Amino acid sequence: MPTATPALPAPAPAPARLGEVSAPVQVVSALDVMSDIEVLFRAPRRSCVVVHDAQGGRVGLLTRHRYTEVMTGRLGYGRAVMTRREVGRAADWAPLVLDAGTSVVDAARAAMARDATVRHDDVLVPGPSWSAASTADLVQALTSALADRAARDPLTGVLSRAHLVATTTQWAAGAVPGTRRRLLLVGLDVDGMAHLNASAGLDAGDDALRTVASRLCDAAPAGCVVGRIDGDAFGVLVLLPAVYDDRATELAATLGARLVGACAGLPVTLRATTSTSLAGWADPGLLLLEVERGLRSAPRASAPAGLPTRDRH
C-alpha cells in the first residue's frame, strides 16, 4: 500500500506544550558587566538573556527592552553610569518561570496575568539548559491550539466531520485536477457499541471509540487524515497516486482490511466500506454520500431484546 502524497497536506498539529514553543536562551552571570552584554544583544533575534546568580542561587531575566532602557537612562546618561555595572543590577529577579509541560493555554493565561510592565516579557523554561518563549510565539501557539481544538472531535481527538469534509473539498480542488490522482475515502462503522454500553457502561464505550480512533491513526498511511463521520463511524481520507481503476479498487480493499485489522481484539468490531473518485476528478459530497450509504446498507449486529441502545455523541 503506497503512502499518500497529498499536494495539499493536512496542517501539522499545533504546539500544545510550552516546551514546543520555547527556544534555547543564553545564560550569563550576574557578575558580568553590562558592556559585555551589549555584544549579545547585537544578534537581531535575541530578545533576552537568563541571568544566573551563583552566590544567591537565583535566576533572573534581562530583556532587550530592559537593557536598552537601563543603558539609555532618563536623561540619556545611562550608558556612562551603567556600562561597568554588574548585570545583576538590571535583571528582573522575579521572572515568570514555567515547566516545559505547561500547556500553551495555561502559559498564555499566566503571562497575561502579570503586571503590565512585564506582561510582554519572555517566559522562562527550566531544564538541562534554559529556554524561553516570547509572548508573540506564545500567542501564535495559543491561536493555533484553539483553532486545532475547534477542528477536532472532542471525544476522540480526530478531525470533526466538518473539518474532514473541508479537507476532502480542499484536496478535491487543489490536489486532484490536472493529474491522474484520485481520492479514496474509507468509511468504518464501529459495531457492537450498544452491547458494550449495556454491559460495561457508557464510559467503556467512550474508551472503545478513543482506542479505535488511535489505532486508525496509527494504521493509516502517512499523509492521510482521520475523522469522525458520525457517532460510531469514522472516515480515513487518502490521496492515491495515478493508478488504473482496477489498481485503485485493489488499494481501497487492502486499506479497508488493514484498518479493520488494526482494531482486532477490541470489545467492538469494525465494518469498512470505500468510495474512490475518478482519476483527475473528485466530488467531495458524492464520496461521503457513497460511504454513508455503504455503512447504512451493511448488516449491523442487533442488540439483545431489552438492552438500551447508545446515544450518539
Image (tube, helix red, strand yellow):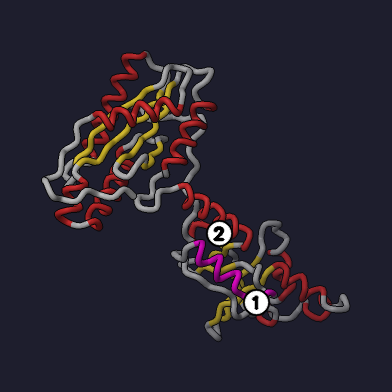
The amino acid type, in three-letter code, at marker 1 is Asp
- Residue 41 lies left or right of residue 201; in this view the side is right
203 and 11: which one is in front? Answer: 203
Dominant secondary structure (helix, strand or loop) of the stretch shown in magenta: helix
Instruction: Find residue 134 and report its image quarter.
Output: bottom right
* Image position of 124 (left or right of 70): left
For marks 2 and 1, give the one nearer the viewer: 1
Disc 1 target residue: 115
Q: Secondary structure at mark 2?
A: strand
Amino acid under label 2? Ala
The residue indicated by pointer 2 is 23
The residue that appears at 53% across and 17% down in the rendered structure is: 178
Can you give x and y, in whole percent of width and height, for residue 166 in the image? 49, 36
Q: Residues within 10 Å of mark 1 (few under 14, many from 20)?
A: few
Extreme-front residue of the structure: 306
- Give the residue at the far right of this rendering: 75
Disc 2/disc 1 C-alpha distance (Å): 24 Å
Residue 132 image-quadrant placement:
bottom right
User: Over which residues does the magenta segment extend?
Assistant: 104-116
Residue lying farthest to the bottom in this orientation: 56
Q: Secondary structure at mark 1?
A: loop
Asked whether the residues under the numbered discs 2 and 1 touch, taking CB atoms below 8 Å apart as contact, a structural biologist would say: no
